[in-house]
Image: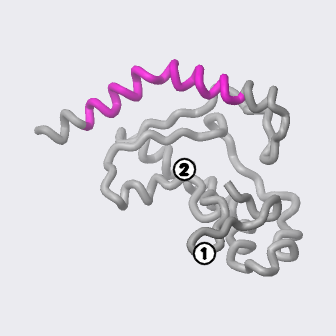
């Protein structure tokens, strides 16, 4: 991950790259476009979470003056994220997407360095994954049966 403002872009093959969440926080539409008709989406916020516009939003264009398109994308990130979550939930209601939410708000910052907090969040995610494993297997198994028909 290379988060804007917090770190420098990563250069690979002559291209400067940032965290993919800048352009597509929840790439469900992309995977549907690529032909995946059943998807498992793992979110990092509990069900019902609504992203609020950053209090630092007025500083983004200044901090990212070298990257005006990135600044524009980040200025609208909350709205874009909330639209993507709504789309994910819409697709889940249609039965083609299984959504895994954390069971509670994760008390960890965007640039967390405390290994104990990171371990705790990891354990919460692992426990939730284990709890949902059978449901995920059944969800994906239903798809393979539909494809064989």
On the image, the x and y values in percent for residue 26 come to 55, 52
Quarter holding residue 76 = bottom right
Label 2 SS: helix
- Left or right of 24: which side holds 73? right
On the image, the x and y values in percent for residue 79 come to 66, 60
Please tell me which residue lies in front, 131 or 119.
Answer: 119
Q: Is residue 135 magenta?
A: yes
Quarter holding residue 67 = bottom right
Residue depicted at x 62% and y 53%: 82
- Left or right of 149: which side holds 59? right
Label 1 SS: strand
Per the rendered image, the range of residues in magenta is 121-143
Q: Given this view, does label 1 or label 2 mark the residue nearer the observer?
A: 1
Q: Which residue position is annotated with label 1?
A: 15
Please, which colouring scheme is shown? Answer: one colour
Residue depicted at x 69% and y 62%: 77
Q: Which residue position is annotated with label 2?
A: 86
Query: Looking at the rendering, in which quadrant would you find the C terminus?
Result: top left
On the image, the x and y values in percent for residue 115 come to 80, 31
Q: Main secondary structure of the magenta part?
A: helix
Q: Residues within 10 Å of mark 1 (few under 14, many from 20)?
A: few
Q: Is residue 132 above or below residue 27?
A: above
Lower position in the chain sequence, tag 1 or tag 2: 1
- Left or right of 49: which side holds 139? left
Q: Residues within 10 Å of mark 2 (few under 14, many from 20)?
A: some
On the image, the x and y values in percent for residue 14 come to 60, 77
């Amino acid at each position: 991950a290379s988060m804007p403002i917090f770190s420098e872009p990563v250069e690979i093959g002559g291209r400067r790259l940032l965290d993919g969440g800048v352009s597509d926080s929840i790439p469900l539409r992309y995977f549907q476009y690529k032909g995946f008709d059943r998807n498992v989406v793992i979110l990092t916020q509990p069900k019902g979470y609504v992203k609020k516009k950053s209090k630092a939003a007025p500083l983004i264009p200044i901090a990212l003056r070298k990257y005006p398109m990135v600044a524009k994308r980040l200025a609208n990130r909350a709205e874009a994220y909330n639209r993507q979550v709504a789309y994910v939930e819409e697709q889940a209601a249609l039965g083609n997407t299984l959504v895994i939410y954390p069971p509670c708000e994760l008390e960890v910052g965007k640039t967390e360095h405390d290994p104990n907090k990171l371990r705790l969040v990891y354990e919460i995610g692992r426990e939730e994954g284990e709890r949902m494993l059978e449901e995920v297997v059944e969800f994906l198994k239903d798809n393979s049966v539909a494809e064989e028909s």
